[in-house]
Image (tube, grey):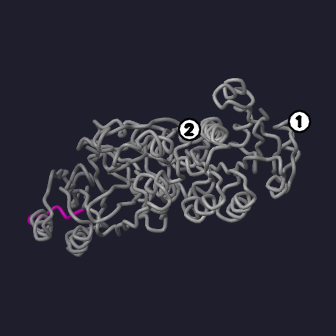
Amino acid sequence: MKSIQVGLLGIGTVGGGVFNVLQRNQEEILRRAGRGIEITMVADLDTARAQAVVGSSVQVVADARAVIANPEIDIVVELIGGYGIARQLVMEAIEAGKHVVTANKALLAVHGTEIFAAAHRKGVMVAFEAAVAGGIPIIKSLREGLTANRIEWIAGIINGTTNFILSEMRDKGLDFEVVLKEAQRLGYAEADPTFDIEGVDAAHKAALMSAIAFGIPVQFDKAYVEGITQLAAQDIKYAEKLGYRIKLLGITKKTAKGIELRVHPCLVPVKRLIANVEGAMNAVMVHGDAVGTTMYYGKGAGSEPTASAVIADLVDITRLHTSDPLHRVPHLAFQPDAMSDTPVLAMGDVVTSYYLRLKVADQAGVLAKVTGILAEAGISIDAMLQREADEVGGEGSTQTDLIILTHDCVEAKMNAALAQMQALPTVLAPITRIRKEELA
């Protein structure tokens, strides 16, 4: 049987990995897919460098549309990234009747609904395992392996840069800015790390997982997004004393009122496996009603881990290439006419628990005023830690840190209580608030 012919749009770090792994494991992949998979055409603006990567047997062009226009190409792999030209090329490939594989989480998070609808109309597949958590097969697990379950919640460390930074802050007791510079020096963080450190990258991925888990449209614009730039080394130390670690989590959860979709730092109990995921590694916890809690761990980025996911998608498409489109696994796991309109909740409607750190004057009555405000708001306290003034500011200090862990409450109530506490003359600095997730 003739090999499936693949065209790559972009052959940078991931594209080079795809080419190399496909070449190296060609025999194994053929045995699994049932027919060969060959990259026969590559588009890249740096044609000389691209040709050096793929050799003389592969056609290299500067114009990506030449790949899409080639009638011999069965699958187009988009590895350009971004929202602009990548969206145009993916839509043109679909219109041309090509299957598409992409690692572009930003594109799918923002334009996924449009792209999947176009693919459904044309009877082609858009596969995107590499778009979430690199080499971890979380998309396949959600779409197929857990299909018998009602998914109740997902919580994931889905950005390796931020996990590396938080791990280093905890290990070395350093502040965020110092560790960020080190992460950039080591290549874990980009020169412009905004998408990572502000939580946007994780939110792209969380929006995709939420759509697959709950059968809703991809709604990145409804996600609550908060990064790690305001985290201080002292909060990581205090969390540790209380039996928690701080992780940037992408969380999506189904509740009676709607779907939670949020990315922010969380205190997670040290006894949870996910709290012990260190460095640039990723991990995703999924809780289903039948299976209980499962966890998926591995490398979330890098040339060959991401290539592993891209090639898995190529194999899937190769197996299903000639099948009736109606018998394929739907892009978002649920049949297109069975998608839900369950709303995504505003952050003010989310129920969770909190870590609060208040820098307060070391004088009588301060604690009573703070706890009184929480009591009036109906927010109960789970645990409290009060540091001696000398420990916080040195001998003779008149300031101290008050650390409070709360039980669950609605975020809007907490926001109102925080505003009242912040207005107290004895509260001497902006209050630090970090959400807490037990993940039980």
Q: Quadrant of residue 28?
A: top right
Q: Which mark is residue 135?
A: 2
Q: Is residue 156 magenta?
A: no
Q: Are marks 2 and 1 in contact (CB under 8 Å)?
A: no
- Image quarter hosting the N terminus: top right
Residue at 83%, 45% in the rendered image: 41
Residue at 90%, 36% in the rendered image: 56
* Type of the residue with mark 1: Ser
Q: Which residues are magenta?
A: 359-366
Could you tell whether 124 is left or right of 221 in the image? right
In the rendering, at what x and y percent does residue 143 appear?
47, 46
**Which of 361 and 204 lies nearest the eye of the viewer?**
204
Looking at marks 2 and 1 on the same chain, the residue that comes earlier in the sequence is marked by 1
Q: Is residue 323 above or below residue 408?
A: above
Q: Is residue 234 visible?
A: no
- The span from disc 2 to disc 1 (Cα, nearest Å) is 28 Å
Could you tell whether 411 is left or right of 83 in the image? left
> Residue at label 1?
57
**Which of 399 and 308 lies nearest the eye of the viewer?**
308
